Image: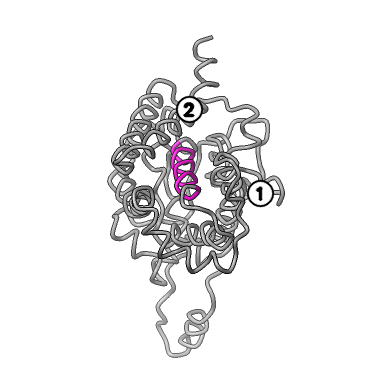
Amino acid sequence: MIHAFAARAFWPAFLAGGLIGTYFAFQSSSPLFWFNVVYLSVVALIALAERLMPYENEWLQADGETFNNVAHTLLSKGAVQVFAAIGASLPMGIASIVQPLTEPQFDLWPQHAPMVLQVVLGLIVAEFGLYAAHRIAHENLFLWRFHALHHSVSRLWVVNTGRFHFIDSGFKIALSQIPLYLIGAPLPVFLWIGAVTAFVGLLTHCNIAVNTGLLDYIFSTPRLHRWHHSKVIAEGNTNYGENLVLWDQIFGTYFNPPREPSTDIGITGRVSPHFIGQLVQPFSKKGARQILGKAPKPVPSTVSEQPIAAMDEAAPLP
């Protein structure tokens, strides 16, 4: 009974606890410091729960990627948190730069609605951009070479939540935040969307045996995200939502069959084992072929073979 209760309680409890802590952090005089205290506290509690109630015991074993995971998190997510914190403490400064570019042209935002409703609306708008960016990154090979870094892990756990290439993160941020700027969303909405994304992200990757039930039809949950990391393309190219699965439901990419998600996750290609290598690998043709799982191109041994090799060189990556 205790295990069943914990399985149902962990996900909503961690999300609610993180957001309640964020509320008090945003009300303080040091929002950056206290938000990160809350964030790291939730990380620690999730890591403890992973040891007590793991979904997959093998995912508890070290994979040699912890340093890389943390480094990518700090590069891709840390900068976003810093700017969010600056916005919390110096809203007029940020507004003076951003809002003059957008508000005079588009003032469509319901400024007088309760903040809770504004955040929900903001999540729906931002989620469309996140969904589009995520789906495009799976369907476009040029962008996949950057997004593949996130899928290259062989286990899911709280620490590799933020394992994203900075190009991948920048693309998602642009498609999700620019529409909000254009329709005049206020800064607190951006801050709260960032907080929701941070905590939902931690939970989608958690290696905890949770039972999210009906929440699977609304939020991006660990169960749905495990399907998304499957090596089977038909399973992996689904559940693109980062916080909500609304757009997956609308566009037919929602996937949640009545069986447990596979723990055989990863990609068929190869990603560099080193942090710097992971950053630069997608920018070269050789690195892209490694990521895509393509064999190295043969070196021509005779003059007669050179036109064929040249033709292959000019051809787009399949």
* Mark number, residue 306: none
> Is residue 199 inside the magenta stretch?
yes
Identify the residue at the far bottom of this view: 303
Three-letter amino acid code of the residue under disc 2: Tyr
> Is residue 312 inside the magenta stretch?
no
Residue 102 in the image: x percent, y percent?
53, 66
Q: Magenta stretch mostly in which secondary structure? A: helix
Residue 112 in the image: x percent, y percent?
59, 47
Depicted 203 relative to depicted 317: above or below: above
Given residues 226 and 90, the one toward you in this image is 90
How did the renderer colour the structure? one colour
Q: Are marks 1 and 2 in contact (CB under 8 Å)?
A: no
Residue 292 in the image: x percent, y percent?
48, 61
> Is residue 3 shown left or right of residue 285?
right
Q: Quadrant of residue 117?
A: top right
Residue 318 in the image: x percent, y percent?
56, 69
Q: Secondary structure at mark 2?
A: loop
Q: Residue, x 37% and y 27% (percent of image)? A: 45
Residue named by callout 2: 55
**Which corner quadrant holds the N terminus?**
top right
Given residues 35 and 254, the one toward you in this image is 35
> Is residue 205 shown left or right of residue 74?
right
Residue named by callout 1: 247
Q: Residue, x 42% and y 81% (percent of image)? A: 300
Q: Secondary structure at mark 1?
A: helix
* Part of the protein shown in magenta: 189-202
> Is residue 316 shown left or right of residue 35?
right
Three-letter amino acid code of the residue under disc 1: Trp
